[in-house]
Image (cartoon, grey):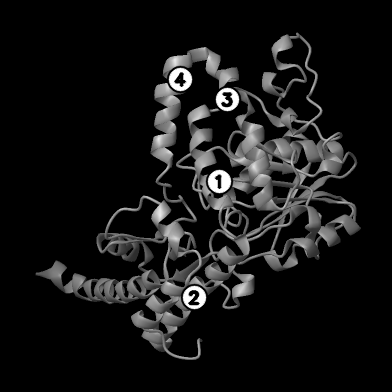
Amino acid sequence: MTDKASTRENLEALDREDCLAAFRYRFDLPNDTIYLDGNSLGAMPRSTPARIDWVVRQEWRNDLNASWWKHNWLDLPRRIGDKIARILGADEGEVIVSDSTSLNLFKLLVGALQLMAGRGTILSDSSNFPGDLYVAQSAARAQNRKLRIVAPARLVDELDEDVAVVMFSQVDFRTGRLVELRPVAEQAHAVGALVLCDLSHSAGVMPLALGHDGIDLAVGCGYKFLNGGPGAPAFMYVANRLLHSIENPIWGWLGHAETFAFEAEYRPDSSIARFLVGCPPILSLIALEEGIDLLLEADLHAVRRKSVALTSRFIDLLRQEWGDDGPEILSPLDGRRRGSQVAIRHPLASRIVRALSENGVIAEFRAPDIIRFGFAPLYVCYADIWDSSQILKRVTHQVDADRRVAPATAKV
């Protein structure tokens, strides 16, 4: 716990000292709402509607089809990819925006399996996002390989020379457990395997260094901490050392070396653009770029410090206000091992999340009994931590009380 008990007053003092405080007003959040679900869908930047309106009313309306080259629409996947590269600690030309996280994961998994001929296994862990595991099952089946799923603590120990690629999420979507990338990469490379990580719950809330850490491949979504809007396009990363050897298994015209040559035979682009397939979703890309541009104004080291502080204060308040009678905290207590969320367990989790929403706190339920609180440091303030913890305690007691009287009421 912190040195002294938290009060709303000392948390407000932290807000006054917060170097990121001004970013809160760059987002268009609903009044009287504490939004703790940015790890599922990020809030909307205030600049996004005007930017989209300009593209729709000026570029699309006035320039019509000429907009593809007049306004460089076709360049958006690369341009935004290079911006995201700065967030990931990657080089220009190593990141591109395309499709969804699942589709990008399939492309990279199949490409990695084709590259690693003679190795028969995708290795992953049971805490990985189920959607990632489904994609891995599909990729393994398509390439006549196998997927081996192990306990999270055993992931590195289970590496062997049959592993083609080890696939994991940097942050556990349920508990917020954070995986340090470099040790996994070093041990995977020691047995000759490739490393593919999902950054969906880490990109945008902490400084990353994919190049320094030796990560080979990565994917991530654009609608969580990158604030790109619902269904925003995803990104994919391929280390430069692999770009000339790994292939995209889905051949599309935008991945062709000469897109507008309209040749009958496919020739892949020599750059990461080979992983493009079809026509890019321009309006969604424009919305994503607004979120990325806003994030690039922030110091990601300061973002990470605030993330750890917010989640740590929230955990302290749960202990301070509840004592030993509070819900089980699933997230690591050490902030260095925790992403930007706190997960708790309660048998009435789904009812509590509904009650929180009715009282102005947006959190998220994950079956069967988990409540996730996501802390986006650019728009969550310290006072929110106090207010949400008090509301959580109140509604939980009320839900518990309602459950106790429900059988008696039913008999009347």
Identity of the amino acid at label 1? Ile
N-term mark: 3 or 2: 3
Q: Mark 4: which secondary structure?
A: helix
Are circles 2 and 1 on residues that touch, CB within 8 Å? no
Depicted 401 relative to depicted 182: above or below: below
Identity of the amino acid at label 4? Trp
N-term mark: 4 or 3: 4
Residue 22 at what x, y percent from top left?
44, 60
Q: Mark 3: which secondary structure?
A: helix
Cα–Cα span, label 4 and label 3: 10 Å
Q: Could one spot residue 392 in this view of the protein?
A: yes
Are circles 3 and 2 on residues that touch, CB within 8 Å? no
Depicted 206 relative to depicted 141: above or below: below
Cα–Cα span, label 1 and label 3: 17 Å
Identity of the amino acid at label 3? Trp
Depicted 398 relative to depicted 257: above or below: below
Identity of the amino acid at label 2? Ile
Residue 60 shows which numbered tag?
A: 4
N-term mark: 4 or 1: 4
Residue 381 at what x, y percent from top left?
42, 67
Residue 368 at what x, y percent from top left?
44, 61
Does residue 185 appear to the left or right of 349 in the view shown? right
Cα–Cα span, label 4 and label 2: 50 Å
Residue carrying label 2 = 329
